[in-house]
Image: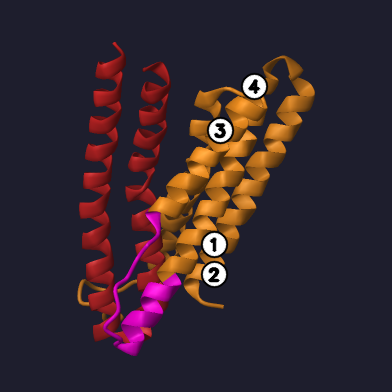
């Protein structure tokens, strides 16, 4: 398994943990159901966006390795539309808080950042290198 | 108020998209260059690119939602 797949698997685990915490919060504090529901819809949309982005990044890497002259497209418009769809579902179909959906849209990004820093730190601790990348 | 809200929506999303475009271009360009030079580091570079692009794209998603809020207010 390559680095990106392992990283994405960890991000998926964190987002599902977040959504399960939201379910528990909804069960314990039903008065704030607008917030819990919005966070869950935003979290689901952010996970879809993370999978789409990883697919596009892998494609860009494959194009670079194959040395093909092809335009690399990261597909931001698709991810923006997914975010917008989450907002529309949360506000039109249900009556969830818009702010909660927007907050939920950044769960995967936040998890990506934190897990990336942690894995980098672990790698540096287990395999110390000097500034030229040579083993000490 | 209506026309000003539309102008605000256009400005906020336009500037957000501009910043994300510049950031994404830099990240993808450097990563593709790095992978072309050292294909054996592809996994590491792809992960770094994934983290960078995820961070860069957080801002335009916020601006998109803000733009639609402004559009709804108009």
The foreground one among B51 and A52 is: A52
Say what secondary structure mark 4 lies in: loop
Is residue B16 found left or right of A89 in the rendered image?
left
- Give the labeled residue for mark 3: A88
Which hue belongs to chain A? orange
Counting every numbered tag in the picture gives: 4
Tag shown at residue A5 = 2
The foreground one among A53 and A129 is: A53
Q: Nearer the viewer, mark 4 or mark 2?
A: 4
Q: Label 4 vs label 1: CA separation?
A: 31 Å
- Give the labeled residue for mark 4: A95
Q: Label 4 vs label 3: CA separation?
A: 10 Å
Mark 4 or mark 3: whose residue is earlier in sequence: 3
Image spot of residue B14 (x, y percent): 24, 39
Is residue B70 found left or right of A44 in the rendered image?
left
Q: Tell me, by letter, which chain the rendering colours red.
A: B
Tag shown at residue A129 = none
> Is residue A23 highlighted in magenta?
no
Mark 1 or mark 3: whose residue is earlier in sequence: 1
Is residue A82 found left or right of A13 in the rendered image?
left
- Give the labeled residue for mark 1: A8
Residue interval drawn in magenta? A58-76
Residue at image location 59% in from the left, 26% down from the top: A91
The foreground one among B43 and A36 is: A36
């Amino acid at each position: 398994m390559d680095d990106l797949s392992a990283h994405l698997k960890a991000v998926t685990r964190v987002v599902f943990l977040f959504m399960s915490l939201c379910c528990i919060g909804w069960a314990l504090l039903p008065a704030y159901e607008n917030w819990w529901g919005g966070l869950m819809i935003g979290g689901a949309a952010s996970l879809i966006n993370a999978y789409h982005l990883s697919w596009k990044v892998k494609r860009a890497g494959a194009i670079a390795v194959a040395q093909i002259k092809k335009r690399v497209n990261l597909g931001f418009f698709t991810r923006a539309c997914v975010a917008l769809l989450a907002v529309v579902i949360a506000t039109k179909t249900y009556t969830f808080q818009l702010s909660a959906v927007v907050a939920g849209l950044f769960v995967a990004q936040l998890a990506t950042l934190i897990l990336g820093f942690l894995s980098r730190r672990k790698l540096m601790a287990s395999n110390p290198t000097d500034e030229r990348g040579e083993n000490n | 108020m209506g026309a000003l809200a539309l102008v605000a929506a256009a400005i906020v999303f336009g500037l957000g998209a501009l910043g994300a475009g510049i950031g994404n271009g830099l990240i993808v360009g450097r990563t593709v260059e790095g992978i072309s030079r050292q294909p054996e580091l592809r996994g590491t570079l792809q992960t770094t690119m994934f983290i960078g692009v995820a961070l860069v794209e957080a801002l335009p998603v916020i601006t998109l939602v803000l733009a639609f809020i402004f559009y709804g207010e108009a």
